[in-house]
Amino acid sequence: MTQDADPGLFGPGSVTWQLHSDPVMWIAGVRALWLQALHPVAVRGVMINSGFREDPWGRLTRTANFVGTLSYGTTEAAEAAGARVRRIHRLLGVDDPELLLWVHCAETDSYLSVARRSGIPLTDALADRYVDEHRTSARLVGLDPDAVPATTAGLAAYFASVRPLLTAGPDARTVEDFLRRPPVRPLLVPAREVIWRRVTALAYDALPPYAHALYGRPAPPPETVTRRLVATANLLRNVPSRLRWRLPPRHVLRAVERLGPQARPDPYARPAPYPLSDPAAILDTPGRTHGIDGGDGTRWGTPD
């Protein structure tokens, strides 16, 4: 690592550093939107205050940039981004800790569930470590880290407690309409039909069963969804990382420039470039059979 370079809030030795570089996080982010929309109070706040209806793409882009800054930016940049978000939350009156906790947990669960089902064999210990790491993200949006789940068991208990509050109300249906057919320029309509519809459909199928029940649309059997996630993720991983990471805003590339080439996320390397204190590597060769968390306390195995 470049001497005196700032590794940021997480650093190359974290689960977050490796996990968030994987392209399957794109699908996980869309799953988080499906899930977040089921909390009627939280999604109402988004609809009223965030300009989602007028500029949904802009809001999604800003969210992705925020996650990238927290994951790979300098400590100063991450803290500044958190301060901006907290200030906006206060001004818009959407800083209720219960609602912030829902958004945080839905994101963390989505990132972790999709990653594991896509063939990333995180051990239970590393999965817990990932959840614990993201209490730092929770602090930056205005939550008390001590009030945020620190393990996968704590995350599951939280969802069990909040599930009676969830419903697919009118605002959730607005989000659903956007996710199914987002407004795009005429030239991009073919790409929306060919690429986006498949991504958002797979993200929906990856939701836990109770979410499918609330939306009123069944999903394929979980084993089928897991196979599709593995196949899609492996297809995306075939796109060279140098190309993927050049997409704006280039967070990973900037982090590597700052810290040196050894900080490049490469979770498939043997040995891993930054061995964790847990002796197990974060990732193994994709496609082997592993127990993968299905996102609702269920575990599925991916086939060879």
Image (tube, rainbow, N blue to C red):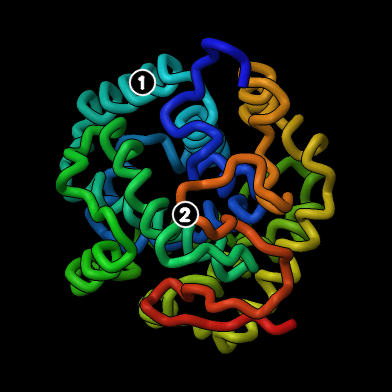
Residue 144 at x, y percent in the picture: 17, 39
Give the residue pinned by disc 2.
278
Q: Which mark is residue 206?
A: none
* Rendered image quadrant of residue 52: top left
In depth, the one of 58 and 241 nearer the eye is 241
Q: Is residue 62 visible?
A: no
Mark 2 residue type? Asp
What residue is drawn where x is 17% and y is 69%? 161
**Residue 303 location, x and y as percent?**
70, 84
Q: Nearer the viewer, residue 95 or 267?
A: 267
Categorize mark 1 by other alpha carbons within 10 Å: few (<14), some (14-19), many (20+). Answer: many
In primary-sequence order, the first of circles 1 and 2 is 1
Image coords of residue 129 (percent x, y): 38, 52
Look at 54% across and 14% down and name the residue there: 5
Q: Quadrant of residue 173?
A: bottom left
State which quarter of the image contains the N terminus. Answer: top right
Q: Residues within 10 Å of mark 2 (few under 14, many from 20)?
A: few
Answer left or right for 54 relative to 23: left
Taking the image as drawn, is residue 144 in sight? Answer: yes
Please state, as top left, top right, bottom left or bottom right, where the C terminus lies in the image.
Answer: bottom right
Residue drawn at x 76%, y 39% is 244
**Cα–Cα gap, marks 1 and 2:** 28 Å
The circle drawn on residue 79 is 1
Disc 1 is placed on an element classified as: helix
